[in-house]
Amino acid sequence: MEIQKQLKSHGAWIGKWTFILAATGSAVGLGNIWGFPYKAGTNGGGAFVLIYLGCILIIGLPIMISEIIIGRRAGNSPINAMKKIAIESNRSSIWQLVGWSGIFAGILILSFYSVIAGICLNYIFIAFTSNGLISSPDQFSSVISSPINLIAWHTIFIVLTALIVSAGVKDGIGRMVKILMPMLGFLMIFMVVYSMINGNFSQAMSFLFAPDFSNVTSDTLLQAMGQAFFSLSLGMGSIMAYGAYMPKNQNVVNSSFTVASLDTLIAILAGLAIFPIIFAFNLEPNSGPGLVFVSMLSAFNQMQFGQLIGPLFFILLSVAALSSSISLLEPGVAYLSEEGVLSRKSSAIIISIFIWILGLGSAFSFNIWSDFNLIGNKNFLDSMDFLANQILLPLGGMLIAIFVGWYMDKSLIKSEVGVTNSLLYRMWRFFVKFVAPLCVGYIFYRQFF
Ligand code: PFF
């Protein structure tokens, strides 16, 4: 067996709740509050929600448990964790490629994530510097038409992310999530109550929970699955990296359930905050990515206290985005710094610069590159999104499930989960070995062949 060099450690979360807060912070983000409602909206509502929930339960949750097991057992960044556990299980170290693909996916995701989060910051700024959220009806087009403007806010967001990550696991990420997450929870509940009172709540409920399967296609399946991976931050090593800092006495299965449930709850709450308002103003639920940035904005503009609630909504989005973006940057930074080549700070700076440059393409896709298509008929931003969320994350997740289900040494798994004769354990095993890989494989097959 190859002897592993001693890798630098990154510290650990203090207490059980820090992992839960950090992992929930990673999971809850633009994907829940911006992505989930608009995707549910364009895919017919209830049917999409139901398929999405199915994906979370039978694919997402088993893979989340697997990622945490690998991460905590290894105590390293995803690349080294995959390598180390593969070697300890007498398998080829080629499995580290899963870690590499994850870092690559994280870079792609953060590059456009930051541009969109930047738009949220820009809205907040506009709200506080002009008297109210909107100065003209088409705020969104004026925000996105200027490359300089988008790039400036993209820069601010990346810098914030890099600052937190470079401060370290305990003092940076751990400390920030304790502030950001309660804030997020409070704002979210506030928004839902506001929508219940001021919007058309019953129509929103039936839109989200009465499924109509007539429009479900293979693309709906792929979108729901991609959304499940994206929303739970799976398939790219964020949760694996966070798992590496989890205390040894913390229960992996219970923590995963908590994180997945909170993530799903927030996505549903976001739907319940947005759609009542959309319906109350007779706006279209299927307007796509502009749902939050255009439709909601025009609704806020006409609503009672809208000028106050609107900025709060975008603060909520920004907080959620920041607690996720740090988890997108962490795996790469952890890898570079544990290899001992660069300090954590320099690693964060170098990777962020790279991501910033890539993000320019996404910023341009709203304006000077709006006619430029990279993959098929998708512009630069949509291509990054497609490549990462619908290909790399499910693929990475599938490989992680196959690795844990078929290749990882059982005694290593046992040392992380404790009991291996319970019904829950056997169910998890079954899902990881068969259900998750086959479902991902099937959805890929239907979509691409
Ligand atoms: N889960 C985040 C969201 O829903 O916005 C985005 C994300 C974070 C995706 C971390 C992937 C990841 F590794």
Image (cartoon, helix red, strand yellow):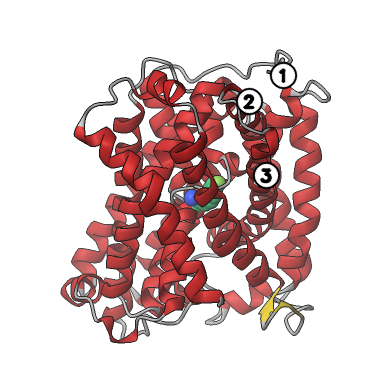
Please tell me which residue lies in front, 81 or 92: 92
Please indicate whether residue 205 sits to the left or right of residue 308 in the image: left
Number of other residues with Cα within 10 Å of mark 2, as a class: few under 14, some 14 to 19, many 20 or more? many
Q: What amino acid is found at the position of numbered circle 1 in the picture?
A: Glu
Disc 2, SS: helix
Q: Residue at x 39, y 44 (%)?
A: 432
On the image, numbered disc 3 is attached to which residue?
A: 103
Whether residues under marks 3 and 2 lie with C-beta atoms below 8 angstroms apart, the answer is no
Q: Is residue 314 visible?
A: no
Q: Position of residue 392 (x, y in %)?
A: 60, 57
Left or right? Give the position of 16 relative to 174: left
Residue 202: give x, y in percent of width and height. Answer: 16, 73
Considering depth in this image, is 14 or 339 the residue closer to the camera? 339
Residue 27 against residue 22 in the figure, above or below = below
Tell me what residue is drawn at x 19 percent, y 75 percent. Answer: 210
Residue 162: name its quadrant. top right
Residue lying farthest left? 202
> How far is disc 3 from disc 2 in space, using C-alphas?
20 Å
Mark 1, residue position = 2
Locate residue 275 relative to residue 38 in the image: left or right. left
- Which sits earlier in the primary sequence, circle 2 or circle 1? 1
- Write the residue at 74% across / 25% down: 337
Give the amino acid at mark 2.
Ile
Residue 139 placement: quadrant? bottom right
- The label nearer to you, 3 versus 2, is 2
Spot occupied by residue 370 in the image (x, y as percentages of width and height): 73, 81
The picture places residue 121, in percent across and down from the top left corner, at 58, 56
| Front residue (pair 341, 296) | 341
Secondary structure under tag 3 reads: helix
In this figure, which residue is indicated by the disc labeled 2? 87
Identify whether 263 is placed above or below 420: below
Q: How packed is label 1: few (under 14 Cα within 10 Å), some, or many (20 or more)?
A: few
